[in-house]
Amino acid sequence: MKILITFLFLFISVNAQQNTMIPSYYKIDSSLSESLLNIVKDLELDKDFDVGEDGIEQISFAVIDLTGDEPLFGGVNPENFIYPASVYKMYVAAEVLHQVSNGEYNLFDSYVVKSPNDVDRSKQIESDPRPLLKDGDTVTINYLLDLMITRSDNTAANCLIDIATRPRINEMMHKYGWQGSEVTRKFLKRTFEDEGYADIRGTETSALHAADFMYRIVLRTPIGETNQLINPWVSKQMKALLGRQLDKSKLAQGLPRNAMFYHKTGWWSYWTNDVGIVDDGNVKYIISCFMPVKEEEALPKFKILAERVHKLISSR
Protein backbone atom coordinates (compact mmCIF):
# COMPACT_ATOMS: atom_id res chain seq x y z
CA MET A 1 0.00 0.00 0.00
CA LYS A 2 2.84 2.41 0.83
CA ILE A 3 4.43 1.82 -2.59
CA LEU A 4 1.07 2.38 -4.31
CA ILE A 5 0.51 5.65 -2.46
CA THR A 6 4.03 6.83 -3.33
CA PHE A 7 3.60 6.19 -7.04
CA LEU A 8 0.11 7.74 -7.01
CA PHE A 9 1.53 10.86 -5.40
CA LEU A 10 4.36 10.88 -7.95
CA PHE A 11 1.85 10.68 -10.80
CA ILE A 12 -0.18 13.56 -9.39
CA SER A 13 2.93 15.65 -8.70
CA VAL A 14 4.45 15.53 -12.15
CA ASN A 15 1.24 15.69 -14.15
CA ALA A 16 -0.30 18.70 -12.42
CA GLN A 17 -1.54 21.52 -14.62
CA GLN A 18 0.64 24.55 -15.03
CA ASN A 19 -0.30 27.47 -12.82
CA THR A 20 0.13 30.71 -14.77
CA MET A 21 -1.83 33.01 -12.44
CA ILE A 22 0.03 35.99 -10.99
CA PRO A 23 -0.66 35.93 -7.20
CA SER A 24 -3.05 38.57 -5.92
CA TYR A 25 -0.50 39.97 -3.44
CA TYR A 26 1.31 41.61 -6.36
CA LYS A 27 0.13 44.83 -7.95
CA ILE A 28 0.49 44.36 -11.70
CA ASP A 29 2.30 47.40 -13.09
CA SER A 30 1.57 47.83 -16.80
CA SER A 31 4.05 50.70 -17.15
CA LEU A 32 6.80 48.50 -15.72
CA SER A 33 5.89 45.72 -18.16
CA GLU A 34 5.94 48.18 -21.05
CA SER A 35 9.40 49.42 -20.08
CA LEU A 36 10.67 45.85 -19.75
CA LEU A 37 9.25 44.98 -23.18
CA ASN A 38 11.14 47.93 -24.69
CA ILE A 39 14.37 46.61 -23.19
CA VAL A 40 13.63 43.13 -24.50
CA LYS A 41 12.94 44.52 -27.98
CA ASP A 42 16.16 46.51 -28.00
CA LEU A 43 18.06 43.30 -27.19
CA GLU A 44 16.20 41.43 -29.95
CA LEU A 45 14.76 38.98 -27.43
CA ASP A 46 11.11 39.60 -28.38
CA LYS A 47 10.87 36.73 -30.85
CA ASP A 48 10.59 33.00 -31.29
CA PHE A 49 13.81 31.07 -30.85
CA ASP A 50 14.58 27.76 -32.53
CA VAL A 51 15.86 25.42 -29.80
CA GLY A 52 16.51 22.38 -31.95
CA GLU A 53 14.47 19.27 -31.28
CA ASP A 54 12.54 21.12 -28.54
CA GLY A 55 10.97 23.35 -31.18
CA ILE A 56 10.19 27.04 -30.73
CA GLU A 57 10.70 28.87 -27.44
CA GLN A 58 10.32 32.41 -26.09
CA ILE A 59 11.95 34.38 -23.30
CA SER A 60 10.40 34.20 -19.82
CA PHE A 61 11.10 37.40 -17.88
CA ALA A 62 9.76 38.95 -14.67
CA VAL A 63 10.68 41.82 -12.36
CA ILE A 64 9.19 42.57 -8.94
CA ASP A 65 9.93 46.07 -7.63
CA LEU A 66 10.22 45.89 -3.83
CA THR A 67 11.42 49.45 -3.30
CA GLY A 68 8.04 50.93 -2.36
CA ASP A 69 5.30 49.97 0.07
CA GLU A 70 3.84 47.22 -2.13
CA PRO A 71 5.39 44.72 -4.56
CA LEU A 72 4.95 45.83 -8.18
CA PHE A 73 5.01 43.08 -10.81
CA GLY A 74 5.99 43.43 -14.44
CA GLY A 75 7.25 41.10 -17.10
CA VAL A 76 7.46 39.78 -20.62
CA ASN A 77 5.98 36.29 -21.00
CA PRO A 78 6.48 35.74 -17.25
CA GLU A 79 4.09 32.78 -17.28
CA ASN A 80 5.95 30.98 -20.09
CA PHE A 81 7.33 27.62 -18.94
CA ILE A 82 10.88 26.96 -20.07
CA TYR A 83 13.81 24.68 -19.27
CA PRO A 84 15.45 26.14 -16.13
CA ALA A 85 18.77 24.23 -16.26
CA SER A 86 20.46 24.54 -12.86
CA VAL A 87 18.07 27.20 -11.55
CA TYR A 88 15.76 24.46 -10.26
CA LYS A 89 18.44 23.41 -7.80
CA MET A 90 17.12 26.20 -5.57
CA TYR A 91 13.80 24.33 -5.27
CA VAL A 92 15.71 21.23 -4.15
CA ALA A 93 17.67 23.24 -1.57
CA ALA A 94 14.51 24.71 -0.08
CA GLU A 95 12.98 21.29 0.61
CA VAL A 96 16.22 19.90 2.05
CA LEU A 97 16.35 22.87 4.43
CA HIS A 98 12.67 22.33 5.22
CA GLN A 99 13.40 18.76 6.30
CA VAL A 100 16.39 19.91 8.35
CA SER A 101 14.20 22.49 10.09
CA ASN A 102 11.74 19.68 10.88
CA GLY A 103 14.52 17.79 12.66
CA GLU A 104 14.53 14.88 10.19
CA TYR A 105 18.31 15.18 9.87
CA ASN A 106 21.00 17.80 10.49
CA LEU A 107 23.05 20.02 8.22
CA PHE A 108 26.22 18.36 9.43
CA ASP A 109 25.08 14.76 9.11
CA SER A 110 27.38 12.69 6.91
CA TYR A 111 26.35 11.45 3.48
CA VAL A 112 28.17 9.01 1.20
CA VAL A 113 28.18 9.82 -2.52
CA LYS A 114 27.28 6.85 -4.70
CA SER A 115 27.26 6.21 -8.45
CA PRO A 116 25.56 6.98 -10.76
CA ASN A 117 25.03 10.33 -9.00
CA ASP A 118 28.69 11.31 -9.45
CA VAL A 119 28.27 12.84 -12.91
CA ASP A 120 30.56 15.88 -12.94
CA ARG A 121 33.78 15.60 -14.94
CA SER A 122 34.66 19.29 -14.74
CA LYS A 123 33.82 22.17 -12.43
CA GLN A 124 31.18 24.73 -13.36
CA ILE A 125 33.46 27.32 -11.71
CA GLU A 126 37.08 26.46 -12.47
CA SER A 127 38.47 28.81 -9.81
CA ASP A 128 36.64 26.98 -7.02
CA PRO A 129 39.28 24.91 -5.16
CA ARG A 130 36.90 22.19 -3.93
CA PRO A 131 37.49 18.87 -5.69
CA LEU A 132 34.89 17.05 -7.77
CA LEU A 133 32.76 14.63 -5.80
CA LYS A 134 33.21 10.95 -6.62
CA ASP A 135 31.74 7.61 -5.65
CA GLY A 136 32.53 6.79 -2.01
CA ASP A 137 33.22 10.35 -0.84
CA THR A 138 31.79 11.18 2.59
CA VAL A 139 30.61 14.78 2.98
CA THR A 140 28.02 16.66 5.00
CA ILE A 141 24.58 17.74 3.79
CA ASN A 142 25.64 21.33 4.37
CA TYR A 143 28.64 20.81 2.06
CA LEU A 144 26.35 19.36 -0.63
CA LEU A 145 23.98 22.34 -0.34
CA ASP A 146 26.78 24.85 -0.68
CA LEU A 147 28.31 23.04 -3.67
CA MET A 148 24.93 22.73 -5.39
CA ILE A 149 24.03 26.42 -5.07
CA THR A 150 27.35 28.28 -5.17
CA ARG A 151 29.16 26.12 -7.76
CA SER A 152 26.05 24.57 -9.31
CA ASP A 153 27.50 21.11 -8.78
CA ASN A 154 25.40 18.43 -10.51
CA THR A 155 26.64 15.54 -8.38
CA ALA A 156 25.65 17.40 -5.22
CA ALA A 157 22.23 18.11 -6.76
CA ASN A 158 21.66 14.43 -7.56
CA CYS A 159 22.53 13.45 -3.99
CA LEU A 160 20.25 16.11 -2.50
CA ILE A 161 17.36 15.11 -4.77
CA ASP A 162 17.73 11.61 -3.34
CA ILE A 163 17.81 12.96 0.20
CA ALA A 164 14.78 15.24 -0.16
CA THR A 165 12.92 12.94 -2.62
CA ARG A 166 11.04 14.31 -5.59
CA PRO A 167 7.53 13.69 -4.20
CA ARG A 168 8.31 15.83 -1.16
CA ILE A 169 10.00 18.57 -3.17
CA ASN A 170 6.91 18.75 -5.35
CA GLU A 171 4.57 18.73 -2.36
CA MET A 172 6.32 21.95 -1.31
CA MET A 173 6.02 23.34 -4.85
CA HIS A 174 2.28 22.73 -4.89
CA LYS A 175 1.84 24.32 -1.46
CA TYR A 176 2.96 27.64 -2.97
CA GLY A 177 1.06 27.27 -6.23
CA TRP A 178 4.04 26.46 -8.44
CA GLN A 179 2.28 23.72 -10.39
CA GLY A 180 4.16 23.05 -13.61
CA SER A 181 7.55 23.68 -12.00
CA GLU A 182 7.85 20.25 -10.40
CA VAL A 183 11.32 18.71 -10.08
CA THR A 184 11.07 15.67 -12.35
CA ARG A 185 14.66 14.82 -13.26
CA LYS A 186 18.09 14.43 -11.75
CA PHE A 187 21.12 15.80 -13.55
CA LEU A 188 22.06 12.59 -15.34
CA LYS A 189 21.19 10.56 -18.42
CA ARG A 190 17.76 8.97 -18.49
CA THR A 191 19.32 5.49 -18.66
CA PHE A 192 20.62 6.03 -15.12
CA GLU A 193 17.41 7.50 -13.70
CA ASP A 194 15.55 5.91 -10.79
CA GLU A 195 12.65 3.58 -11.48
CA GLY A 196 9.61 5.54 -12.61
CA TYR A 197 11.59 8.56 -13.80
CA ALA A 198 13.34 7.39 -16.97
CA ASP A 199 10.46 8.42 -19.25
CA ILE A 200 9.14 11.36 -17.28
CA ARG A 201 8.84 14.84 -18.81
CA GLY A 202 11.75 17.21 -18.36
CA THR A 203 11.73 19.79 -15.59
CA GLU A 204 10.39 23.23 -16.51
CA THR A 205 9.69 26.44 -14.64
CA SER A 206 8.62 30.00 -15.40
CA ALA A 207 10.04 33.40 -14.58
CA LEU A 208 6.86 33.95 -12.55
CA HIS A 209 7.40 30.92 -10.32
CA ALA A 210 11.13 31.54 -9.91
CA ALA A 211 10.52 35.20 -9.00
CA ASP A 212 7.76 34.23 -6.57
CA PHE A 213 10.16 31.76 -4.92
CA MET A 214 12.62 34.62 -4.35
CA TYR A 215 9.84 36.89 -3.11
CA ARG A 216 8.90 34.39 -0.41
CA ILE A 217 12.46 34.59 0.92
CA VAL A 218 11.98 38.31 1.60
CA LEU A 219 8.18 38.46 1.79
CA ARG A 220 7.04 41.97 2.68
CA THR A 221 4.33 42.86 5.20
CA PRO A 222 3.40 46.18 6.88
CA ILE A 223 5.84 45.31 9.69
CA GLY A 224 8.72 44.41 7.37
CA GLU A 225 10.27 41.23 6.04
CA THR A 226 8.86 38.00 7.47
CA ASN A 227 10.88 35.37 5.54
CA GLN A 228 8.03 33.09 4.56
CA LEU A 229 9.70 30.51 2.33
CA ILE A 230 8.75 27.57 4.60
CA ASN A 231 9.78 29.47 7.74
CA PRO A 232 12.24 32.22 8.76
CA TRP A 233 15.12 29.75 9.32
CA VAL A 234 14.77 28.20 5.86
CA SER A 235 14.40 31.63 4.25
CA LYS A 236 17.55 32.97 5.89
CA GLN A 237 19.54 29.84 5.07
CA MET A 238 18.44 30.11 1.43
CA LYS A 239 19.37 33.78 1.29
CA ALA A 240 22.82 33.03 2.72
CA LEU A 241 23.42 30.28 0.14
CA LEU A 242 22.22 32.43 -2.77
CA GLY A 243 24.39 35.32 -1.61
CA ARG A 244 27.50 33.14 -2.02
CA GLN A 245 26.81 32.38 -5.70
CA LEU A 246 30.12 32.07 -7.57
CA ASP A 247 28.76 32.51 -11.10
CA LYS A 248 28.98 36.23 -11.86
CA SER A 249 28.88 35.89 -15.65
CA LYS A 250 25.19 36.67 -16.26
CA LEU A 251 23.03 39.37 -14.61
CA ALA A 252 25.65 40.09 -11.95
CA GLN A 253 28.05 41.58 -14.51
CA GLY A 254 25.62 44.43 -15.22
CA LEU A 255 24.80 45.35 -11.62
CA PRO A 256 26.54 48.09 -9.61
CA ARG A 257 29.48 46.92 -7.50
CA ASN A 258 27.70 48.01 -4.32
CA ALA A 259 24.62 45.89 -5.08
CA MET A 260 24.15 42.61 -3.25
CA PHE A 261 22.74 39.91 -5.52
CA TYR A 262 21.24 36.75 -4.01
CA HIS A 263 20.75 34.50 -7.02
CA LYS A 264 20.87 31.18 -8.84
CA THR A 265 22.10 30.77 -12.38
CA GLY A 266 21.81 27.99 -14.91
CA TRP A 267 22.76 27.15 -18.47
CA TRP A 268 22.58 24.23 -20.85
CA SER A 269 22.62 23.99 -24.63
CA TYR A 270 20.10 26.60 -25.85
CA TRP A 271 19.16 27.94 -22.40
CA THR A 272 20.85 30.57 -20.22
CA ASN A 273 19.13 31.72 -17.01
CA ASP A 274 19.51 33.82 -13.88
CA VAL A 275 17.11 34.76 -11.09
CA GLY A 276 17.68 36.64 -7.85
CA ILE A 277 17.15 39.46 -5.38
CA VAL A 278 18.99 42.76 -5.97
CA ASP A 279 19.57 45.15 -3.07
CA ASP A 280 21.87 48.17 -3.35
CA GLY A 281 20.62 49.96 -0.22
CA ASN A 282 18.45 52.36 -2.21
CA VAL A 283 16.41 50.05 -4.41
CA LYS A 284 15.40 46.45 -4.00
CA TYR A 285 13.86 44.17 -6.61
CA ILE A 286 13.67 40.64 -7.93
CA ILE A 287 14.74 39.86 -11.48
CA SER A 288 14.03 36.54 -13.14
CA CYS A 289 15.17 35.90 -16.69
CA PHE A 290 15.18 32.70 -18.74
CA MET A 291 16.64 33.12 -22.22
CA PRO A 292 16.34 30.38 -24.88
CA VAL A 293 19.74 31.55 -26.13
CA LYS A 294 23.12 29.80 -26.06
CA GLU A 295 25.40 31.09 -23.33
CA GLU A 296 28.01 32.75 -25.54
CA GLU A 297 25.29 34.82 -27.22
CA ALA A 298 23.28 35.40 -24.05
CA LEU A 299 26.00 36.76 -21.73
CA PRO A 300 26.39 40.22 -23.34
CA LYS A 301 22.59 40.53 -23.44
CA PHE A 302 22.38 39.69 -19.71
CA LYS A 303 24.86 42.47 -18.93
CA ILE A 304 22.86 45.10 -20.79
CA LEU A 305 19.57 43.76 -19.43
CA ALA A 306 20.80 44.06 -15.84
CA GLU A 307 22.18 47.56 -16.39
CA ARG A 308 18.96 48.83 -17.92
CA VAL A 309 16.64 47.19 -15.40
CA HIS A 310 18.64 48.57 -12.49
CA LYS A 311 18.57 52.06 -14.06
CA LEU A 312 14.82 51.69 -14.65
CA ILE A 313 14.04 50.66 -11.05
CA SER A 314 16.34 53.36 -9.65
CA SER A 315 14.57 56.08 -11.62
CA ARG A 316 11.00 55.12 -10.72
Image (cartoon, rainbow, N blue to C red):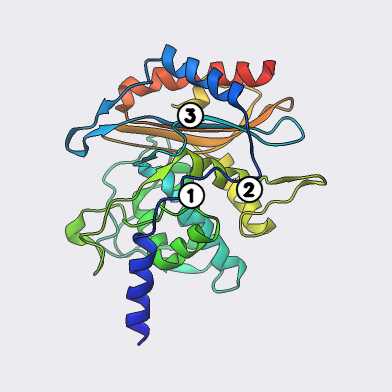
Q: Position of residue 306 (x, y in %)?
A: 52, 21
Does the residue at mark 3 contact the one at mark 2 (Cβ under 8 Å)?
no
Residue 55 sits above or below residue 280 on the image = below
The image shows residue 200 at horizontal and vertical percentages of 25, 59
Residue position marked by numbered label 3 in the rendering: 248
Q: For numbered disc 1, what is the local secondary structure?
A: helix
Q: Earlier in the sequence, mark 3 or mark 1?
A: 1
| Residue found at x 25% / y 68% | 196
Question: Disc 3 and disc 2: Cα gap in Å?
Answer: 21 Å
Q: Is residue 33 above or below residue 204?
A: above
Circle nearer the N terminus (3, 2): 2
Is 198 or 21 nearer to us in this picture? 21
Residue marked by disc 1: 90
Q: Pointer 1: residues within 10 angstroms few (<14), some, or many (20+)?
A: many
Q: Amino acid at mark 2?
A: Ile
Examine the rendered structure and indicate whether residue 304 appears above or below residue 49.
above
Give the image location of residue 1, x and y in percent.
35, 87
Residue under circle 2? 217
Kindly identify which numbered label has been placed on residue 65: none
Amino acid at the residue labelled 1: Met
CA distance separating discs 3 and 1: 17 Å
Residue pushed farthest bottom?
1
